[in-house]
Every structure is written in structure tokens, then in C-alpha cells.
Image (cartoon, rainbow, N blue to C red):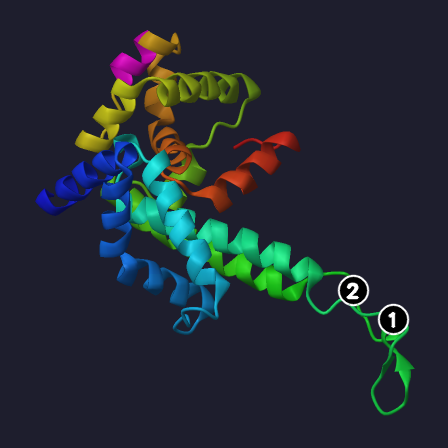
Amino acid sequence: MKEEHRIIQQVYKAKKDMEAADRLISAYIPFIRSETAKFLKRPPVEGQDDELSIAMIAFHEAVRSYSRLRGSFIKYAAVVIKSRLIDYRRRESRHEGVISLHTASGEKEQPLEETLTDGVDHGETIAVRDATRREIEELSRQMKEFGVSFSDVAEHCPQQERTLTACRKALEYAREDGEILDILLRTKRLPVTQLARGSGVERKTLERHRKYMIALLLIYTNGYEMIRGHLGRRVKGGTAL
């Protein structure tokens, strides 16, 4: 806890002081290289792999956007780095190996357009899948600290539209109320009474769906960008969170 508190102090100082930010980045170069290596599945080569520069920029972005409500800075920074590297991979994949579909391919001089099986960028798909898997594993570990599992979330997910609407209302209030989130992260318990009073949602509704609420608040306040994107698409499609 003391170490985490020290890091947070350094991060908040770096938000206002560019020299402090540079010192922080320099101190965490090994961490940045490690996160880049996880993404590349090999050690990055300085001056050759643009991913290392992208990761450094992402680390600085994490410093600027971090707040205590997001929990551990290191975990948050790792998620931001991973997300920016995925964005970079996606952009690069659109331009990589751009050749005519009519170019001959193979010994039979078969046009390349006839060898394509689908329009899926499999490299990007694998990268996104791996990133999502890592987020799910990290979320699972964090939820355990709060006494919540994925089966709990499924079991306590609202089934009726009216209940879902009420939970969404409470979630929006909690996300905007710093005190609610602070109590949740500090005590590992959802302050149901305070949340009910502030959001106007019945206490019994919040009690019944408490574990579902905790999971969603963790997802939306701790940088799980891949999972948030997936949930956002489900909501737009009319499926309950």
C-alpha cells in the first residue's frame, strides 16, 4: 500500500510538472518495455520497433488521465498501453502489404483475388482477442477482491427492463459521484444506503443486484477499454448489460 501511495503521489506531481513526468517515464522504462514485449511476444528493439515509442506515449497519456478512482496506476497504465498498441496495430494493418488483387500468386499464376477466403484481418483479430482475454483475466482477479465472480454477475444481472433501467440510473449516479466510488474502492463494499438515497433507486433493488453493480462499476472506472467497448455495442444493440 505504501508503494502504491508513493506511485500515486509521483503521478499527480507529474500531471503538473513536465520534468517530473520525464523522470517518471524514465523510471518506468523497464515496465513500458515489459508491456510492449507482452504485446509483441518478444523484447522490443529500440530504434526499430515503433511500438516502444507508442507505449511510452501511452504511459504519459495514462499519467495525464489517471485518477485515484481508477485504482492501481500500474494496472491502469498497462491497460492504456495495451489499448494504444492495438490501435496502432489496426492502423498499420490497413496499409501493410497493399498490392493489386490481380497480382499472380503461387506456381499456377493464380490471381491473388482468387486465393482470398474472407475479408477478415486475422492478425488484428488475434491481437484484439488476446487483449480482451488479458482484460477478462485482470477483471476476474480484481472482482475476487470484492467477493464477486462472473457467475455472480450472471446470476444477479437484471432480467426485467424496469429493473435494468433502475440499475443503470444508479450506475450513472455512482460513476459521477466520487464519494461512492471512493468508498467502494476503499472498503470493497458498495455503499447501498448512500447510493439508494442519492440515485432515488430502491434499496432492495440495489441489494438484489449488488454484485452486478460492483462488476459494472469496476469495468467503467478501471480502464477496461476492450470490455467497455463490447458492452457499449451490446447496449446499442438493445441487449441488457
Task: Give the mark nearest the N terminus, 2 or 1.
Answer: 1
User: Residue 194 in magenta?
Assistant: yes
The single residue placed furthest to the left in the displayed view is 2
Q: Quadrant of the N terminus?
A: top left
Q: Position of residue 240 (x, y in %)?
A: 56, 31
Residue 11's quadrant in the figure? top left
Left or right, 212 with reference to 50: left
Left or right, 68 with reference to 220: left
Name the residue located 42 percent from the left edge and 33 percent from the top edge. Answer: 220
CA–CA distance in space, label 2 to label 1: 10 Å
Label number found at residue 118: 2
Left or right, 190 with reference to 62: left
Q: Provide the residue span drawn in magenta.
A: 192-197
Q: Residues within 10 Å of mark 2 (few under 14, many from 20)?
A: few
Q: Position of residue 128 (x, y in %)?
A: 54, 56
- Residue with the mark numbered 1: 113
Label number found at residue 218: none
Depicted 67 relative to depicted 128: above or below = above
